[in-house]
Image (cartoon, rainbow, N blue to C red):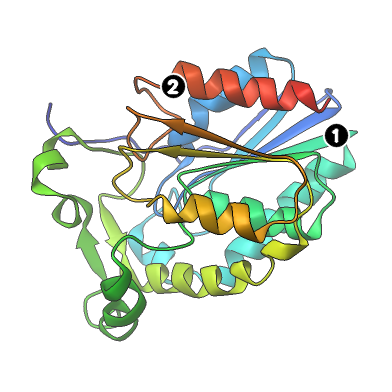
Amino acid sequence: MSNTNQFDSNSYEFNSNSKIGVYLIHGFSSTTCELKQMANALSNAGHHVVLNNLPGHGTNLEDCNNTKYQDWLDYSKIEFAKLCSHSDKVFLIGHSMGGVLALYLSSIFPVTGIIVGGTVLKFKLHFSTNYLNRFLCRIIKTRKKKLVADKSIRDSLTFYGYQSYPLIALNEFRKMNIYVKRQLNKIKSPILIIHSNQDQVSIKDNVEIIKCSVKSENKEVLEVENAPHSLFHNNKDTELIFQNCLNFINKYI
């Protein structure tokens, strides 16, 4: 299967009259496309669903490279606060960098439950992301995503946003992780952490970082075997992941 790209510049909102709110947050350099199927499943369950593109996403690489991590924090905080004002119970679902943002929001809002999948608090390419890119991103501003991936899987990857990584924005992602890690001990809401052993981006260490740092009494981990990093879109484990997410939400409403 050849490498493909799926790009969605749209934002979505469903069932605005429902008092059960679910705010979904996509990953770095991606778009709402990667969470649209999850949004539809939640919508079919009758929940008020909000799914937006983050600042610098769903537009172009230059726009993303001009975005600061505070823009992502502020935007998600404002949008989630709107949902909270119309809801009796609220849930967060974040994928990859969206998982980091979901953790941040749950450290400052009294959320009913949190679901994070493929979260990247610790980067797989530790040295290049945390050290080299900090200095080189002003010179080399983008890099093709498929060149970063293992050769064995390059042709099978599907990207749900930009075809290249915006490297200045990646450095902002790195800085945001440092900040959010310091907030994790403020989280007390029930949490479901999803990880795939086939994830090409998020390493399993991220599961332990979250489990050991948050103060939630109820911590659940769902480990799947077949999904790629894009956990919530068209893979062999999608049905299992969606059902576990719905069951988790139903448990607390």
* Residue 217 in the image: above or below residue 19: below
Q: State how far apart marks 2 and 1 are (Cα).
A: 25 Å
Q: Position of residue 192 (x, y in %)?
A: 63, 38
Q: Amino acid at mark 2?
A: Thr
Among the two numbered marks 2 and 1 on one chain, the one whose residue lies closer to the N terminus: 1
Residue hosting label 1: 89
Asked if one can make out residue 15 in the rendered structure from this viewpoint, the answer is: no
Residue nearest the viewer, comparing 61 with 42:
42
Q: Residue at x 14, y 55 (%)?
A: 147
Asked if one can make out residue 236 in the rendered structure from this viewpoint, the answer is: yes
Element class at badge 2: helix
Residue hosting label 2: 238
* Residue 9 in the image: above or below residue 232: below
Q: Residue at x 61, y 57 (%)?
A: 212
- Graded by Cα atoms within 10 Å as few (under 14), some (14 to 19) or many (20 or more), the crowding at tag 1 reads many
Quadrant where the image shows the C terminus: top right
